[in-house]
Image (spheres, helix red, strand yellow):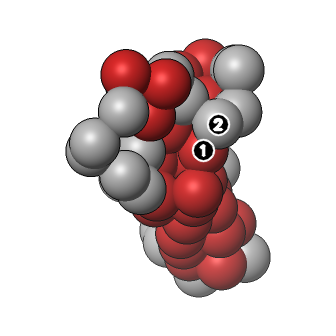
Amino acid sequence: MRRVLTYTFLLGGLGLMVATYFFGAAPWCAEEVACSNPRLEWSSVLFVFGILLAFGSAIVYEVMKDPSDGEIE
């Protein structure tokens, strides 16, 4: 369960970063000044949220304990 949730956070964060960069923030034309504005207004916030999700996968991995791991005393 820990591995599945960790990979879900990691892939979700990476997917959100890629999607918001290529489909929300990156301009497709370079000839006009209007192309310098992002197409999605909150794309930078979503990109940062994707970074937080990707780094949060390490927190999920450390906080969740696997039942097959024995306690070290």
Q: Is residue 30 above or below residue 67?
A: above
The residues bearing labels 2 and 1 have C-alpha atoms spaced at a distance of 5 Å
Residue topped by disc 1: 24
- 68 vs 70, left or right, is right
Q: Report x, y in % for residue 15.
A: 55, 65
Q: Quadrant of residue 9?
A: bottom right
Q: Nearer the viewer, residue 59 or 27?
A: 27
Q: Quadrant of residue 36?
A: top left
Identify which residue, 44 or 56, lies in the foreground. Answer: 44
| Residue 11 visible at all | yes
Q: Which circle, 2 or 1, is nearer the viewer?
A: 2
First in sequence, mark 2 or 1: give its number.
1
Tell me what residue is drawn at x 58 percent, y 57 percent.
23
x, y (%) of residue 5?
A: 68, 66
Q: Is 14 rendered above or below residue 35?
A: below
Going by the numbered disc 2, the residue's amino acid type is: Arg
Residue 66 seen in the current view = no
Question: Would you say the residues marked 2 and 1 are in contact, meaning their CB atoms lie under 8 Å apart?
Answer: yes
Of helix, strand and loop, which one carries label 1? helix
Q: Which quadrant would the C terminus be assigned to in this image?
A: top left
How busy is the neighbourhood of tag 1: few (under 14 within 10 Å), some, or many (20 plus)? many
**Residue at the front extreme of this rendering:** 31
Q: Measuring 61% from the left and 19% from the top, which residue is drawn there? A: 45
| Residue at image point 27% right, 45% down | 30
Q: Which residue does the numbered mark 2 point to in the structure image?
A: 39
Q: Residues within 10 Å of mark 2 (few under 14, many from 20)?
A: some
The N terminus sits in image quarter = bottom right
Residue 13: x percent and y percent?
55, 52
Q: Indicate whether 25 appears above or below 16.
A: above
Question: Helix, strand, or loop for circle 2?
Answer: loop
- Left or right position of 31 against 24: left
* Amino acid at dot 1: Gly
